[in-house]
Image: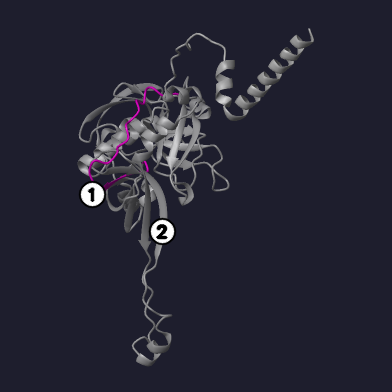
Amino acid sequence: MKKLWLIFAQTVTISLGALFVTQTFYPELLKQSLVPKTSPPVQVSQVAPEQVAQIAGSYSSAAKKAMPAVVNIFTSKKSEPRPLHPFMDDPLFRHFFGDQFEDEQRSDNSLGSGVVVSPQGYIITNHHVIEAADEIEVALADGRTMPATIVGTDPETDLAVLKVEATNLPAITFADPDKYSVGDVVLAIGNPFGVGQTVTQGIISALGRSHLGINTFENFIQTDASINPGNSGGALIDTSGNLVGVNSAIYSRSGGSMGIGFAIPVSLAKQVMEQIIRQGSVVRGWVGIEAQDITPQLAESFRLSHTQGSLIAGVLPDSPAKKAGLKPGDILLEINGNKVVNSSSMLNLIAGLQPNDKAILKIARNQRELEVEVVIGKRPSVQQVLQDRR
């Protein structure tokens, strides 16, 4: 019995020594022996990377699609040369004071953003970004810089079209204006404060904003996506990377974003852009009236049952309206069968008519409804209006 216990003790000692040696010098053998035998792993379908991004709420694909088409715009305006000092012809005077009285031209620089709308180098931006600029330089997303020329501008919508001598540029795609609505997520892309291309996110807060006193023709998209100085002329895109509007203005008491920004809708931008590229300017209809909205007080005064329509407050001399017999106090109700809701809709309806075409205007005069035929004229430019007022 004693001999059996001795053999058992020796066996245990040898086994523990072997285990120690294996653990020290060949640990992988021990790990393999301890892993239990299992069935082959179950095959699962891996979610695509873009699906993961979408599930996580990322808009990186939309940004990557649109960002190459958004450019930075740098403008400069040469200041007036300073008059020469009367003693500058004196060589001794120039020797001592020449550096202080040199006839130099300084440049005032400003910046903004723009959107490439055609591979042939057409860029849309705000009129106020390039207004009065002597030199315009465009910086593309790929790092290239090149000079740009003005194809045409439309101050009444605050839009302008530029052209650079380049081809095969990444152009943005236009969204369907009938497919977006309040609450849709949008991204604003631009160059705020000159820090570089930046993307901000928000929603469409409202559509059809007007009576803001920003432009003559207003139909703004309101958004809470951050828009700051330098973003003007940049892109407002949807979550598919399509252009929804052109960032134009903000409401601010401090100069920075307060969550109320305005963009020109893509439908208006496209219409203006096409006219400028085709003919260098925008042609709009005009009848020559001054109008105002119908308030409840005016409706009561004119014994109207509603506040729809536009009150003709004045008729310009030698205008189509004057020739057609329109008078101050008339209330414009319809234009070619389209109802006039207010003075803003009236302005848009008339502007959409072609010069020299005839239009039927339905008016209310002395509590009677009349139809008047007017030959549409061509709306004068802002410069012509200012000259006429002088």
* Magenta residue check for 177: yes
Q: Identity of the amino acid at label 2?
A: Asn
Q: Identity of the amino acid at label 1?
A: Glu
Closer to viewer: mark 2 or mark 1: 1
Tell me where the magenta segment starts and ends, as one range: 157-181
Q: Position of residue 363 (x, y in %)?
A: 35, 26
Q: Residue furthest bottom?
A: 92
Label 2 with label 1: CB-CB less than 8 Å: no
> Is residue 210 among the parts visible in the rendering?
no
Q: Quadrant of residue 264?
A: top left
Q: Quadrant of residue 271?
A: top left
Display coloring: one colour
Quadrant for the C terminus, please.
Answer: bottom left
Q: Position of residue 253 (x, y in %)?
A: 57, 46
Closer to the chain start, of discs 2 and 1, is 2
Could you say whether the residue bearing mark 2 is in a helix, strand or loop? strand
At label 2, counting other C-alpha atoms closer than 10 Å, the crowd grade (few under 14, some 14-19, many 20 or more) is few
Q: Which residue is mark 1?
A: 165
Above or below for 109 versus 332: below
The residue located at (39%, 46%) in the rendering is 113
* Magenta stretch: dominant secondary structure: loop
Quadrant for the N terminus, please.
Answer: top right
Q: Which residue is mark 2?
A: 109
